[in-house]
Amino acid sequence: MRKNSENWLNLKVYKISMRLHTSRSFRLIIGLLICLPLTFGLSCDDPAPALPKHEFRAVWVATFHNIDWPSAKKMTSQHQQKEFGKLLDKQQRMGMNAMVVQVRPSGDAFYKSRYAPWSEYISGTQGLPPKPYYDPLEFMINSCHDRNMEFHAWLNPFRAVSHTRFSSVAPQNIVNKHPEWTFQYGSRLYLNPGLPKVRDYLVRVVMEVVKNYDVDGIHFDDYFYPYPKNGEQLPDKQTFEKYGQEFADINSWRRNNIDLFIKALSDSIKVVKPHVKFGVSPVGIWRNRNQDHRGTPVRSNFSSYDMLHADVRTWLEKGWIDYVAPQVYFNIEHPTADYAVLVPWWAKNSFGRHVYVGQALFKSKQGESRPWRDPNQLPQQLKLNLRYPQIKGSIFFSANSFDTNPMNIEQVLRHERYRFPALIPPMTWKDSIPPFAPQNLKVKGMANGNAFLYWKAPLPAMDGDTASYYVVYRFSQSSKINLQDPSRIIQISKAQTFVDLNRNPKKDYTYVVTAVDRMHNESKTLAAQYLPAEKKEGHSSGRSDQ
């Protein structure tokens, strides 16, 4: 990074403030720096950003080698279901509103599929279903939706066999049906992205999930072409010679192969189920600026564009994906890949799509380096995210990293960063039509001092959508109704009733209920009812705006 640049100066101001945030001289130093220009979105004389009302809060659940769930092979179906339910309850208590679950770890499936065998991580042997039989994907989707959480199906498209010696491989696996579609690299088998038949096949694999299951999103991680290994070349030269004549070099051809796959899948999802979101979680660095003037001003020797042939920035620019979840698995002030530099770059290069930052909770759990043993590292990262309106949330890797509560992350989320509920941010390019307001809201004081609310579902909006869930707000009579204040939210639920257990019967309240559709558009109009102090029945002066 150029040291005479204004951005460099802004970043140094921020870093100084982070190091001195507990210092007695902090206020004095901030006062001295107040006159410096700040274009990074930070202003020393401004209060910290307010907590957002809309935020994607999710956790990756890795099934590969039973990392997160199920915790062991050959677990009974009942035990699997109970374990997943506990996992969801824990995450929801911490404020999460979405789950990203791996349903195709390695050429296999956590669902009944025409194209892939049952995963060995669900049954112990690839090709064998869970016992007693159930559909894990359907169960997980229903479990999330019952809790009003989104479910994003995470698939690894090109990884076919995780280990050529130790993995269980069923006879019906695609590597046995079409060995000519694969190549070995290291100890793994991969489907060759350079073959048109492979790309077509993988679009069918993903669309099977889209068509057959009520998923909210399709999610890929960073695995496209395999991670490079020292001294080993990718064995796709013959494929390049056959299909890559129009390209000047093999790397440009490889990137085009992945581009073609991403665009074909994007188009297919939009035609079949346009409400399904499509997201990708690449490594945290697209390209270095010394490689490309559009790149990030860091000095890492690894990038998704050059090493994995995944041009994620182009996918965002062309609108092929709906969100990106870069794995910014670096600490603030990292010497070659600073979190505080990478996050603003992704915000600037989002092209109107959502950015959900991949948070390295596992590094806090492992305490692998001094920065990650600092209990302020993750809180500072989450606070920095708020400075950029393009950053719409976070995904934590991974679920089991919460088990030991590293650096008191549970308290940080439950009582600080996620202390107010959040709605998932709407994607207006997919759907911008809000539902109508709930009908016939009634609020009654109860004998025990609680308040009972009930209402009816709204009529369908212009696009046919009605309410998917409801948001209940509570305001004291002296306060202005401000639906952008998440601290006023007391319930987000699919239910059409609510009991306010925390009402002070000696205070006047106005209750507001809005309807929200599946794509998280909130009704512009609202239903409101006033409940005065020491009253047992709802007051007739309430209003219902339609």
Image (tube, grey):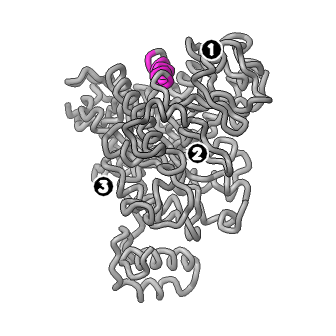
* Tag nearer the camera, 3 or 2: 2
Residue 507, horizontal then vertical, whole percent: 39, 49
Query: Which portion, as a residue range, is magenta?
Result: 198-211
Residue 265, horizontal then vertical, whole percent: 40, 28
Is there a contact, CB below 8 Å, between mark 3 and mark 2?
no
**Residue 205 located within the stretch drawn in magenta:** yes
* Front residue of 469 and 232: 232
Q: Secondary structure at mark 2?
A: loop
Q: Main secondary structure of the magenta part?
A: helix
Q: Earlier in the sequence, mark 1 or mark 2?
A: 2
Please state, as top left, top right, bottom left or bottom right, where the C terminus lies in the image. Answer: top left
Q: How far is mark 3 from mark 2, CA to CA?
A: 31 Å
Residue 248 can be seen, yes or no: yes
Residue 324, horizontal then vertical, whole percent: 44, 45
Residue carrying label 2 = 94
Q: How far is mark 1 from mark 3, CA to CA?
A: 70 Å
Disc 1 residue crowd, few under 14, some 14–19, many 20+, Cα 10 Å: few
Q: Is residue 63 left or right of residue 485?
A: right
* Front residue of 53 and 359: 359
Please state, as top left, top right, bottom left or bottom right, where the N terminus lies in the image. Answer: bottom left
**Residue at 45% over, 31% down:** 217
* Tag nearer the camera, 1 or 2: 1
**Residue at 60% over, 27% down:** 182
Q: For the residue marked with disc 2, what is the amino acid?
A: Met
Residue carrying label 3 = 478
Q: For the residue marked with disc 1, what is the amino acid?
A: Lys
Is there a contact, CB below 8 Å, between mark 1 and mark 3?
no
Is there a contact, CB below 8 Å, between mark 1 and mark 2?
no
Q: Secondary structure at mark 3?
A: loop
Q: For the residue marked with disc 3, what is the amino acid?
A: Ser
